[in-house]
Image (spheres, grey):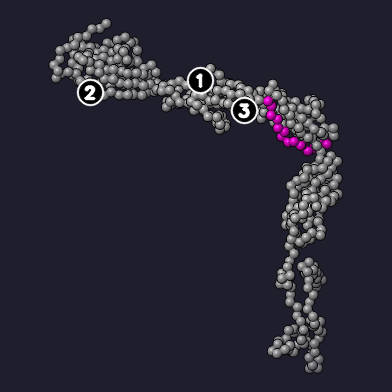
Amino acid sequence: MTTTTTPSTPPHAQPVITSHAQQLMIDEGDQVELPCVVTNLGEYNLIWRHGNEILWILLEKHGERLEQEMTTRDSRLSLEGTALNLRDAQAGDAGTYTCEVSTKPPRTLNHTLDVRVPPTVFPAHNRSVVTVKMGSSVTIACHPYGNPRPSITWNLKGRKLTRVPSGNRLVVTNAQPEDNGMYTCTADNGAPTTAKAVITLQVMFPPRVRAEEEEVITGISYGATLACFVEAEPMARVNWYRKGDIPVDPLRLPKKVDARRRYSLQFDMVTLEDFGVYTCNATNYMGNSSAVIHLTGRPKPVRYFSSPQGEENTTYTLVWDVESYAPVLTYTISYGNESDPEDQWVNLMVPGTSSSSSLHSSSHTFDNLQPGATYHVQVTATNEFGESDVNETFAFSTLQEETDEEEESSQVTPIKDAAPFGTTDGEGAKPTLQEPQVIHDGVATAESSASAQDSAAPTLTPAERRTQMGAFLTAIILSCFFS
């Protein structure tokens, strides 16, 4: 052990430490300088300590300062004058550093150094996959490390986190399939980098099966695909059956599955015997479930193409089409006024249609309708395999009949009591009609009073006026053609 003597220096020449104490935070791997500026050090010794460990002692020998290293062989430490330098700081370097001058009593300066260590985090018990049965409870957790102690945040990949975490723990009660997923806990303590750990939660549950389409419509010699979606944990075994419990022929009908767990059964060319009911059945050790799919050749629902607003008062033409791979035998039409209950609608049947394709078009004209009324109609198509489902009810309206006032305003006012040219009807009355005249021997006579107008012209209905106008236009066109 080194023994030092305290020189007898006059009080006015006592050493003084002029540096100030500091609290420093540095990142792991950084370099730091701890200052200790001393005036009038003279022959006194200067000692650097880390906690209770002596790091350096500055001694004077023969008028020259000498650096003597004490108890430590750490090459990361060095002195710059009286300041202590530390390179490549590590977590163990944190603590109190004391600069001490060997006066009586000793004069000291304390620096507090904290080394921020980037966080690391690991799943609790190193379990990156946690399995639990549906309805049970489970806790997933992660353990963070670093300085200062990191805080933890949780998130669920691709979805909103519905469970409320508590620090580094996440409790899942009454676990459901919706809780399945990859949970990430992120550790952060302000260092330049964060750390993450991923824990996958697997909730074991019996299969859930959903048909892509509950009914697939096709035709003989056409293709078809039946498909179902299966959710299960663990992964389910899926089999296809027809007519209840008859397994499908895997050589004729290939089965496929994709990444979405969509299981399909492919028909390249449907035969008459293929029509019927198919079952997609999924099984795992938690249970089993099924979905039923009908393969049929009946028509699809009818689609309407007419305008909802008719152009006539008492008639309306409805146009529709339907997809059917077999000829349509009949169409069934049900219609009624919107004020009539559905059980009082009129039902009728019209002949079906054949087509070179699977698309069939047809129409029907309704007569004796009420003007300005709204009607509801439903059309179904039937082929040899059955009747189509009813599409949504189609509503149409007839044209409103014109009122008497509208009719009168649209008619030409007839000329009554036409008088011969040059005569008057009453006082100061002017001639109401000028007729062509022929002069014979200076005597003016009316040539032919073809429109004497002894009585008012008859009233015409709107339909009669349109007919009359059409005949008039036809006469004009013919006269122009033959002139």
The numbered mark, 1 or 2, whose residue comes first in the sequence reads 2
**Secondary structure beneath label 3:** loop
Q: Which residue type does callout 1 highlight?
A: Phe
Considering the image in quadrants, where does the N terminus appear? top left
In this rendered view, identify the residue nearer to me: 155 or 116.
155
| Disc 3: which residue | 176
Q: Is residue 255 visible?
A: no
Horizontal arrangement in the rendering, residue 66 relative to residue 446 (left or right): left
x and y, in percent, of residue 394 in the image? 74, 51
x and y, in percent, of residue 15 in the image? 19, 18
At label 3, counting other C-alpha atoms closer than 10 Å, the crowd grade (few under 14, some 14-19, many 20 or more) is some
In this rendered view, identify the residue nearer to me: 93 or 391.
391
Q: CA distance from mark 1 to mark 2?
A: 47 Å
Circles 3 and 1: CB atoms closer than 8 Å: no
| Disc 1: which residue | 122
Quadrant housing residue 36: top left
Boundaries of the magenta span? 206-221
| Disc 2: which residue | 18
Q: Is residue 291 visible?
A: yes
At label 1, counting other C-alpha atoms closer than 10 Å, the crowd grade (few under 14, some 14-19, many 20 or more) is many
Quadrant housing residue 200: top right
The residue at the far top in this view is 1
